[in-house]
Amino acid sequence: MKKRVFLSLAALVFCATAPLAVYAQQGKKAAVVYYSLSGSTDKVARKIADVTGAVLIRIETSEPYDTKDMNKLRDYVKNQQNTKKWPALKPISINLANFDTVFLGSPVWFAGIACPMVTFLNQTDFKGKKVVTFGTKGGGEGNFFSDFKKYVKNGTVENGIVFTGSDKDLDKKVTDWVKKVKL
Ligand SMILES: Cc1cc2nc3c(=O)[nH]c(=O)nc-3n(C[C@H](O)[C@H](O)[C@H](O)COP(=O)(O)O)c2cc1C
């Protein structure tokens, strides 16, 4: 009886950690690099890291966006996009040479990727990397994936998925999706 309980427990632990174990056996490493203003993309990024064992790196702007007035924020962001004056970032300590796969995540901003993600992509070379893109949205994703393709230098870009930030089943949807991604 004790043996049976032990075996069931062992099977459970194996199932829970299987994606990570398989991934580790392949000897590959992944990073999740993402921007999130209000927390939804952060939630998705953390889940991806949970399931894959990837290293989590959050991009932050040197000057925080003022989110008190959403209309003003929208005008401010629109102006950054129109003028291509992308915001400066806090220093990030990441050596991409350590990773085979990079998950890149961003909220959808005006049917494209968020401005801080553009800054990051402008200063990064993805040569030899597999890049998997993901995001969160309120309504529609527009040019989100083509924006990533436009700004990612040299890597092989795979369109992932854009989740709805307010989705109640977000955790499960992210888990189901990321388990299918070939790392
Ligand atoms: C400046 C701005 C522009 C946005 N533009 C869009 C858009 O074009 N399409 C959309 O579906 N959602 C849009 N949203 C909503 C966000 O994409 C959505 O709330 C997202 O889940 C936020 O992610 P975060 O919590 O990680 O910042 C916009 C939000 C902001 C702040």
Image (spheres, rainbow, N blue to C red):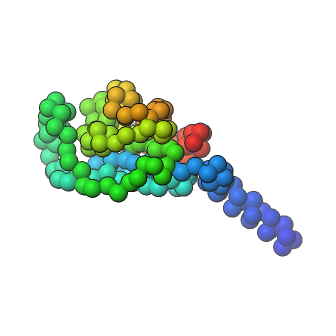
In the picture, residue 75 is in which quadrant?
A: top left
Q: Residue at x 47, y 32 (%)?
A: 156
In the picture, residue 116 is in which quadrant?
A: top left
Residue 172 in picture, x, y percent from top left: 54, 47
Residue 178 in picture, x, y percent from top left: 55, 43
Q: Quadrant of the N terminus?
A: bottom right
Count the numbered circles shown: 0
- Is 95 rendered above or below residue 118? below
- Is 2 rendered above or below residue 51? below
Outermost residue, bottom side: 2
Q: Quadrant of the C terminus?
A: top right
Q: Residue at x 33, y 32 (%)?
A: 151
Q: Is residue 168 shown to the viewer in this render?
A: no
Q: Is residue 178 shown to the viewer in this render?
A: yes
Residue 44 in picture, x, y percent from top left: 44, 48
Q: Residue at x 14, y 46 (%)?
A: 69
89 left or right of 23 in image: left
94 left or right of 69 in image: right
Q: Is 129 in front, or is 168?
A: 129
